[in-house]
Amino acid sequence: MRALTPQKIRVILAGLMIAMMLAMLDNMIVSTALPRIVGEFGGLNHFTWVVTAYVLGTTVSTPIWGKLGDLYGRKSIFLTSIIIFLIGSALCGMAGSAMLGGPNDGMIELIAFRAVQGLGAGGLMVGVMAIIGDLVPPRERGRYQGLIAGIMAIAMVAGPLVGGFITDHLSWRWAFYVNLPLGGVALLILATRMHLPRYRTEHRIDYLGAALLSVGITALVLITTWGGNEYDWTSPQILGLAALTVVSLVVFGFVERRAPEPILPLHLFANRNFALISAVGFLLGFAMFGAMNFLPLFQQTVQGASATNSGLLLLPLMFGMLVISVIAGRVITKTGRYRIFPILGGVALLAGMVLLSTINAGTTKLVLSLYMVVLGVGMGFLMQTSMLIAQNSVEQKDLGAGSGAATFFRSIGGSIGIALFGALFVHRLADSPAGSALAGEGGGAGVDPTALQNLPTQIREAVMSGLADSIAYVFVWAAVIVILVPVLAWFVKEIPLRGVGDKPETPADEAEVALAKAEAIAD
């Protein structure tokens, strides 16, 4: 790899931050607009699929994008992912319009186009992480952890605000069209200014492994979405999907062991730290996506906030995440130590979920804000630290595959979490008095915040109580899931990080690093 000056690295990092902002802004903008979309198209049962399709597309594509970057070079692959993301954005904005056949199939079209968007977003996320991993040594990455967290926080605050403004004053379609100018700027900057070393290796693309992984994960998400709602758990459809999941993933394991260039190299999991942090990432994605998608729904329907104000009301969550991420990043850069942070993050994440499981129709905005701060602290300790540990556990030649695998497990956790939480939410709501009230008032349109306020007082109170109870029920199960996060993080081995050109100060230091790496692999 040819040497890059600090100035060139800063230009590349600036371009990467714009691309990361692109993907993160979209998810947050759409989350705020979802109640209005459901109000227009109906289909409350498909509410979470607008998000699930996006995350599922991201999930199945991240290992593929990561491996393609290792084989073909990261720049061309990264730019391709941006183009796919922008095409998906344009199609999402046209869903249900006269151009594509009218509103009757609007929700189905939107879900399908969100999957296309997700395919591009998978390349954005893993590409940013892998390119930073190429340019910045492990110990110095702690310095950029705060920067990445800042971009995430800006996106998570600006996203709901932009989404709320668009939803309140324009059309929800602009929640997708807004990606086009921003993405065009990112594409231009990166195409002209991101000069990375070009390399190509002898390779064979693992198409069979990619297909088996996609089929297995999709079937698994369908099980969590349809089981107990669309179909009984013992129905032929669910049992058939279960069999397809098991067969696909088992065969995938055999294929990966023999593939010359596996999409998901199984030898990575021989490293204890990588295996543990992948599991932590799965659980983090499971919990995080659930929180981010149900909080705006609670704020807009139960607390009566406008779409714009619901974005502002997420500020406590972002504040907690940003402050902790910056502090953790600086400590890691200074000390080279990181093990304590995922442990603390797991404890705070669990505490946040437990607190959110107590919300009801009478919960005030102040109380909800305090609960979100705790949740944000947990996310701040975990988000970038988990990726740092994953990258530090693999060799440089596997950096793209390792980054892709780490992102994959976080994304698959999100896919399954959103699907399962959505199924739990819909099932709980249907069994409550609110379910009957919504059915009598037009189904999905009843969760449109504007329509909800126009319901008769008695029906409106029943609906808000049922919605609050159903959302709290989601967080009960999220708390059960994240109990494992601090437990798994406890067993991560501390391997000191090195900076640019760092050498062990003493033979004892060198022996410490070598022993830690050997133990991590042996375990």
Image: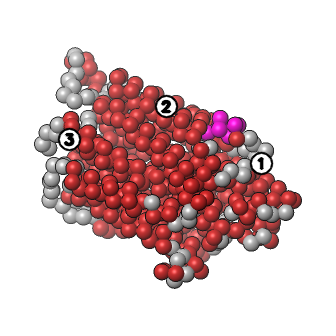
Residue 371 magenta-drawn? Answer: yes
Q: Pointer 1: what residue?
A: 361
Q: Residue 493, position in %: x, y?
A: 39, 31
Residue 456 magenta-drawn? Answer: no
**Up-down: is 374 above or below 414?**
above
Dot 2 amino acid type: Val
Specify few, some or many for label 2: CA neighbours under 10 Å numbering under 14, 14-19, or 20 or more: some
State the residue in front, 192 or 442.
192
Q: How many marks?
A: 3
The CA span between labels 1 and 3 is 53 Å
Q: Pointer 2: what residue?
A: 323
Disc on the earlier residue, 2 or 1: 2
Q: Quadrant of residue 359?
A: top right
Q: Residue 494, position in %: x, y?
A: 38, 28
Q: Nearer the viewer, mark 1 or mark 3?
A: 3
Q: Residue at x 48, y 80 (%)?
A: 100
Secondary structure under tag 1 reads: loop
Q: Quadrant of residue 50?
A: bottom right
Q: Pointer 3: what residue?
A: 8
Asked if residue 170 shows in the view, the reply is: yes
Specify few, some or many for label 1: CA neighbours under 10 Å numbering under 14, 14-19, or 20 or more: some
